[in-house]
Image (cartoon, rainbow, N blue to C red):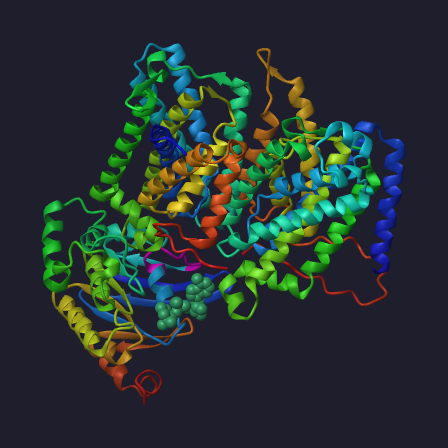
Amino acid sequence: MNKNTLFYLALLTGLLFLAQSLLNDYYQRVLAVVFINIILTVSLNLTNGFVGDFSLGHAAFMSIGAYLSAVLTLPPASKAGLMPQLPAWLGQLEVPFLAATILGGLLAALVAAVVGIPVLRLRGHYLAVATLGLMVIVRVVAINWTAVTRGAKGINGLPAFTNLWWVFGWAVVTVYVVWRLVNSSYGRAMIAIREDATAAAARGVNVTAHRMLAFCVGAFFAGIAGALWGHLITAITPHSFSFLITFNVVVMLVVGGMGSISGSILGATVMTLVPEFLRRVETSLSLGGHPLYGLSQIIIAVTITLVMIFRRQGLLGGREVQLPRLFDRQRALPQARVDTTG
Amino acid sequence: MLLEVENLSVYYDSIQALKGISLQVDEGELVTIVGSNGAGKTTTLLTISGILRPRRGTVRFQGQDITRLAPHEIVRRGISHCPEGRQIFTGLTVMENLLMGAYHRQDRDQVARDLAWVQELFPILAARRRQLAGTLSGGEQQMLAIARALMSCPKVLLLDEPSLGLAPMLVDTIFEVIQQLCAQGVTILLVEQNAYQALRVADRAYVLETGVIKLSGPAQELARNEEVKKAYLGG
Amino acid sequence: MFSLPYIAQQVVNGLTLGSIYALVAIGLSIVYGILRLINFAHGDLLMVGAYLALALLLNTALPLGAAVLLPMIIVGGVGMLVERLAYRPLRGAPEVAMLITSLAVSSVIQNGTIMTLSAQPRAFRLPQELIAQQKVGVVSFSTLDVLSVAMAVGLMALLTLFVTRTRVGIAMRACAENLRAARLMGININQVIAYAFAIGSALAAAAGFMWAGRFGSIEPFMGFLPGLKAFVAAVIGGIGSIPGAMLGGYLLGFAEIFFVGFLPPELSGYRDAFVFALLLLVLLVRPRGLLATVAEREG
Ligand SMILES: Nc1ncnc2c1ncn2[C@@H]1O[C@H](COP(=O)(O)OP(=O)(O)OP(=O)(O)O)[C@@H](O)[C@H]1O
Ligand SMILES: [Mg+2]
């Protein structure tokens, strides 16, 4: 890490301290959701933005991460009450939050690998349907596997471990890992696949392996985000992670511009805050005494359609914004230019 | 002039495939464009038929600017394009393929007459009428592609490498048909890598190299040109 | 182990469910065939059709036939409108852009319904004589089942005539196979695509009526699952192929019913999971489906 990065990290940390002491609970929670959405968007960018596959599996992977981590972090006492049919060894287990989160991510990645084997041999768009199908599968399992998931009732009373520091930390890790990956030879191969898979294969790129790598890494962080979300809200049900979540993450990605990490961060931030504001407006609006629920989602969806028609490349157009370099004594590293306008 | 291309520049993203080419085809002429792989021949034809949009330049047909028209409008005006690599509809029968060629036409009687005419031109198609086009041999598919293009009753026929991938015997047949069509008054713009044959049958020719017209003139003259001989006629 | 009447009953059930999937799958398949667009809004048109049918049944004295036909016409128009407004401006854009737009269209339709009609489920009651189970021989079914199957088969027969006997219908197949060649032949692809959307959407509306009649209640998100499953059906049959969509629809209908009917009851809660597991399996062993026409690029 160079000085610039350290400086900005320190700055953000300071701001976070300020936020923690100045903001009320509501705003702190919104801020936490912003960071979770950054994790989701940046990780989805790997498949959807850099490799050019279109995954809609983030809700499914979140669900997996959330359920596994919940089962792992719940104290044995509450597990005995909530899930009496749990296998004994699992019932006794109490895993620290960090480990539970990572395990949740790993399980999500494992599931991604299993789904990826049939699907990633085909064009990228089969992935969209298969991953939505995966969401249905995960939900059905969550509803029916009552011994572990408590079925439709869901699991409540999760320890409220998630705070600003956890989500911030994981967001930094996500951005760092994705950034390193994208700027490595793996990343160049991924972009080559997006531009022209046949040509990439002809040049000796192992197309399936790279698509798989991106898909699994994306799923891992989605699982992490699910775990964080579960321990923020402290209750999860089979319907917590719905198509709506996936759609909204896609919106964040697209608004920021696919293929740009800073775009994802920006998109996640904007598209968390704007709808949050809209929802508050929406509940106060009414037409002839009839509340206009759904209006904010309509506005978001229409916006995204207009973005697709008029500014397909999103806010940042697939480029990265760079924060000004304050300590520029060393040679400036050439920044990977990622162009998605084609 | 029936067809005039003026100063045409076409790009694929940032790659310029045509660098301001101009060419003309007069009524009743058989004009050929020869050039090596990647010269821009297909690009030229696709731009004339409205599939590709030029960044600069115009295409005029019968004196009217057709540069910005949709492909189906261009076909309606009388330009028919028989694409490179046949591109017949393999899942449709031979007859259905032919009917698609006449898609925009309302004059049923004339369409029926043209159907009879192309089947006379290519008797094999008559025999295979109900067969799926995908089951035809390569040569038969090429004939179908030409017949299909003729079904739109074109004033100009654009032919993109009709001899590609055919056995020498069939190549001769195809060129015979081209001459026959020409004799019947169909105006033809022929793109070929088989420069020898193309220059033999054509009235005039253009030599295209990396997006630029290098030479043009009567086909016989070009066939005697030393440069052309060296580059396209094998010495 | 299973009695013959029981098996016959399962076949009847598979046939009715399969008819619905087939009708929805056709629309998805023709649109995908031409535009390579996975139209996620397709299932929502099914929902719109069901709501329209309910509105007609509740508020008018129109005969039942009209409550099926009018929504088909209206939804066909809605499908064309959606294509005109949202998809046509994206002609030539990357497939991803269309995919995202279809997600957005889906969201607009769902939330528009919520905003105007609320998210509450509504009862979809058909006249008793339609839904009463009748026993004929060893199997029992309702008049609605018979009508559904008959209507689905009739519509599919009409569609088959359309795509083999009419100029526009043949052009639709031509477009699905090779869009550029179709344009070079002078086919106005925008017109053909508009037809494809109109037909597909109308069929979805018909399916919506059957679906609603079968389950007795409707809600704004009801289109999601049948839409997605119909896509699975289309993939099984070979996406882009109309006979493939029909075949896939019935196969999926039977598979789903048999899964519930012939496997231990503890598993029946997993039926939706089974459908998508089936998709993965099909993609693994026969990625182009059974009657594929669309050549899928690998990698
Ligand atoms: N879809 C495309 N995208 C990018 N570049 C293209 C595309 N199509 C053609 N080109 C490039 O444009 C140039 C001209 O191609 P074109 O197909 O017109 O050549 P051609 O003369 O028809 O060649 P051939 O004899 O091989 O058919 C080539 O350099 C080619 O690589
Ligand atoms: Mg060519």
Asked if residue C178 can be seen in this view, the reply is yes
Left-right relation of A322 to A187: right
| B143 relative to C87 in the view: left or right | left
Question: Residue, x 23% and y 48% (percent of image)?
Answer: B103
Estimate the x, y position of residue A338 in percent, counting from the top left: 63, 58
Give the left or right position of residue C219, taking residue C290 as reference: right
Q: Which residues are magenta?
A: B47-56
Say whether residue B50 is magenta: yes
**Can residue C26 be seen at all in this image of the molecule?**
no
Q: Quadrant of ligand 1?
A: bottom left
Which residue is the extreme one toward the front? C1
Q: Residue B133, how many percent across, how many down?
A: 23, 58
The image shows residue A189, relative to residue B233, as above or below, that is: above
In the figure, C222 relative to A290: above or below? below
Task: Please name whichever residue, B100 or A147, is drawn nearer the observer in this view of the structure.
Answer: A147
Residue C284 place in picture, x, y as percent: 48, 53
Image quarter of the N terminus of chain A: bottom right
The residue that appears at 53% across and 41% down in the rendered structure is A133
Q: Main secondary structure of the magenta part?
A: loop
Given residues A12 and B209, the one toward you in this image is: A12
To which quarter of the image does residue B32 belong? Answer: bottom left
User: In which quadrant of the rendered view does residue A29 lie?
Assistant: top right
The magenta stretch spans residue B9: no
Q: Of residues B99 and C240, which is closer to you in this image?
A: C240
Q: Which residue is rendered at x = 22% and y = 81% of the image?
A: B220
Q: Is residue C100 left or right of residue C24?
A: right
Q: Position of residue A307 (x, y in %)?
A: 56, 41
